[in-house]
Amino acid sequence: MDISVTGHVAGISEEQFDRLDPAVGVVACYAKVKQREADGRWRVTYVHGTGDGQTKAAIPLYASYSADWSDPAYDPRAWALPPAIRADCTAARCMVVESYEDRCSGLHVDCSAREPRQLRQILAAMAQAAAGQDRCLSFPYFSSAARDALSAAACGRIAWVPLGAEAHIRDLADPDWESNQPKRVRYNLRHDRDLIASAGITSGHCSWSEIEDAASELIARHNIRKHQPDHPEFVRMRHRLWAECPQAELVVFTARSPVVTGVETAVLWNNELDLREIGLAGEEGADRRAAYLDLVFRQPIAFAQSRRLRRIRLGMGAEMVKTGRGAVLQDLHGGVLTASDARRFADEHY
């Protein structure tokens, strides 16, 4: 395999890039990765591997211009790593592998190049890039399969810890999906529909442009209520990027009753629906819960089945609620290859 380093994804085939890790979804697709190049907080480098005239690897590495993490969830100092490993993991000392947002990272390496020998060659180039800036390599929110492949290639030098799990609802194109679910799931789905009906919820979906102002306010207020700093203009910016993402469709689900108003945004891409952000206004209680269940489960499931989609990505958190409605969990892990180990690994294998 031939390895090179480049500063732009534009020289890499979009079709070949998106085939490298089809399991990760829209947050790591070519168009979204290309958008991140315009983020002035980060400098990006791609490790590009080719063989037989095809792209075998195209891994983005992000170096922050700031010492502070833009998203605390990506700060390895907050992960359950040994103190000696996490102590020096400021944003200025880390090179982040694959993504610094969305809590989901792909591994843009072709299946044929994930065996230890070839992946070690790719990892050595990544380590060389990090060592050149005296940075460690941070691997945030990687699947178990990606973690295992990287661990084998790194000869166990990457320290890993669990960071949670992402929930997926699969096989929705099957018309018998609900009837094939366990009894507990079927009961919950029926109970949800009854609760939504009794709350008098009016449901619908629309484009982002139709509801941008109201949705931005709802989502920002909801995030602030959950102790996550936000502002309607930041919400607007995030969703305009999704609306401008080629080959993706930004959808907004709405729910309204006399006492509750809510929205849920989602991105449709490559036969999948990825739920992004929710906004709910109204007092805690049965009606608010009904609106939540309508926005996060009933409407997206019905939409996915109408489009014969293969999967809904529900993100992290609320695991019992999601598995109780047919979701399966995919464990996500965070890892660090320290700056000193990156330097040694590059010297040995690059």
Image: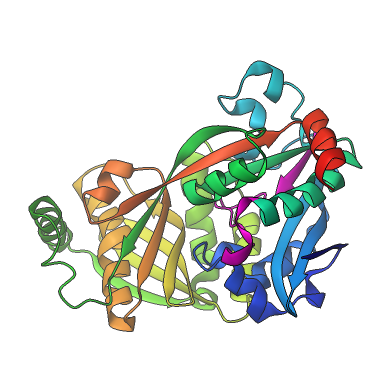
Q: Position of residue 92 (x, y in %)?
A: 83, 36
Q: Residue at x 15, y 59 (%)?
A: 189
- Against 76, residue 28 (above or below) is below
Q: Residue at x 55, y 50 (%)?
A: 146
Is residue 314 shown to the viewer in this render? yes
195 part of magenta stretch: no
- The segment highlighted magenta reads 93-116
Quarter of the figure with residue 334? top right
- The residue nearer to you, when weighing 211 against 345, is 345
Q: Residue at x 21, y 49 (%)?
A: 324
Is residue 72 shown to the viewer in this render? no
Q: Residue at x 69, y 68 (%)?
A: 56
The residue furthest right is 132
- The residue nearer to you, when weighing 89 against 190, is 89
Instruction: Give the overall secondary structure of the magenta segment.
Output: loop
112 part of magenta stretch: yes
Locate residue 122 relative to residue 306 in the image: left or right.
right
